[in-house]
Image (tube, rainbow, N blue to C red):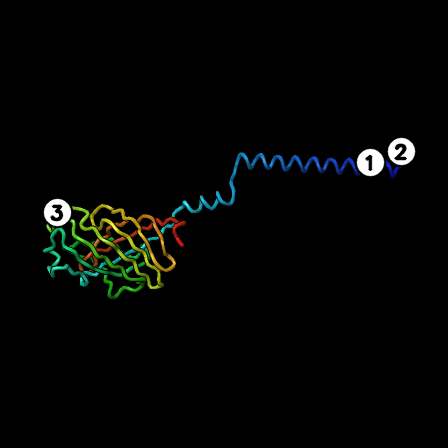
């Protein structure tokens, strides 16, 4: 056998070895994929199932409160409908403290940093005297979070009480069109106007954002 023939045979052996190695690698990868089928779609599904969390504070303005029959708040009865609004702030802005009898010192007229308007239209679930005695939730109603940047979030359900209230997130507008999820409402206290400061934590289903 000549040197040229020997070299050619060597090249054939090397080529065959490379082909066998590549085939084995493909087989190993395929086997691993069968055992761990983490596809792009699976990763997207995992991401979609992790809720988008947003937190906002709201200072309710008692001066905007109106009952349908013109009665003052202390005369509210179960079944009375009402509307009230307030200012939205980034989560963690508003202080804890203050009661309906002894309001806190936060002043929405002088505080800076508001990022939108909050509106609640609802119906009393108990008489005011019963609410002061601890009846909750105090009302059921629809809340509108109208942000200065054009986004809108809408929730519906129980409102107000010493215990956190869980409310369904039923829709939105702008970049939040079609959103669904849950909202946890927590009472922080009251502000200088005489009504509540609250914190709202949204858990939004990512796949619901259109």
| Residue toward you, 175 or 90 | 175
Quadrant the C terminus occupies? bottom left
In what element is the residue under mark 2?
loop
Identify the residue at image location x=41%, y=45%. Answer: 49
Extreme residue toward the bottom, this view: 110
Q: CA distance from mark 1 to mark 3?
A: 97 Å
Q: Secondary structure at mark 3?
A: loop
Horizontally, residue 178 falls left or right of residue 35, namely left
Q: 10 Å neighbourhood of mark 1: few (<14), some, or many (≥20)?
A: few
Picture residue at 27% right of the left edge, 59% below the top: 118
Residue of label 1: 9
State how far apart marks 2 and 3 are (Cα): 107 Å
- Answer yes or no: do the residues labelled 1 and 2 have beta carbons within 8 Å? yes
Does the CB distance between marks 1 and 3 fall below 8 Å? no
Q: From the viewer's perspective, is residue 3 above or below residue 163?
A: above
Q: Residues within 10 Å of mark 3 (few under 14, many from 20)?
A: few
**Which image quarter holds the N terminus?**
top right
Which comes before the other along the chain, label 2 or label 3?
A: 2
4 relative position to 71: left or right: right
Q: Position of residue 202 (x, y in %)?
A: 33, 51
Q: Earlier in the sequence, mark 1 or mark 3?
A: 1
- Please name the residue that numbered disc 3 is placed on: 133
Q: Nearer the viewer, residue 108 or 21?
A: 21
Residue shown at the point (14%, 54%) measured from the top left: 80
**Comparing labels 2 and 3, the label whose residue is closer to the camera:** 2
Q: Quadrant of residue 142?
A: bottom left
- Judged left or right of residue 42, residue 209 is left
- Percent position of residue 115, x then y: 32, 62
Whole-number angstrom distance, CA of label 1 to CA of label 2 = 10 Å
**Residue 153 at x, y percent in the picture:** 32, 56
Picture disc at residue 1 = 2
């Amino acid at each position: 056998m000549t040197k040229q023939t020997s070299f050619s045979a060597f090249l054939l052996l090397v080529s065959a070895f490379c082909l066998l190695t590549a085939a084995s690698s493909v087989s190993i990868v395929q086997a691993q994929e069968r055992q761990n089928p983490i596809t792009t779609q699976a990763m997207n599904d995992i991401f979609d199932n992790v809720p988008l969390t947003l937190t906002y504070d709201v200072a309710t303005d008692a001066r905007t409160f109106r009952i349908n029959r013109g009665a003052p708040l202390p005369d509210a009865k179960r079944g009375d409908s009402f509307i009230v609004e307030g200012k939205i702030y980034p989560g963690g802005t508003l202080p804890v403290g203050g009661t309906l009898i002894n309001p806190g010192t936060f002043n929405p007229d002088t505080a800076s940093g508001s990022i939108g308007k909050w509106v609640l239209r609802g119906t009393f679930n108990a008489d005011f005297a019963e609410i002061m005695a601890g009846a909750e939730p105090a009302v059921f109603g629809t809340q509108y979070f109208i942000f200065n940047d054009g986004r809108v979030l809408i929730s519906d359900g129980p409102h107000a009480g010493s215990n956190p209230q869980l409310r369904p997130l039923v829709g939105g507008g702008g970049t939040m069109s079609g959103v669904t999820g849950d909202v946890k409402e927590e009472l922080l206290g009251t502000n200088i106007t005489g009504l509540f400061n609250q914190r709202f934590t949204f858990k939004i289903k990512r796949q619901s954002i259109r």
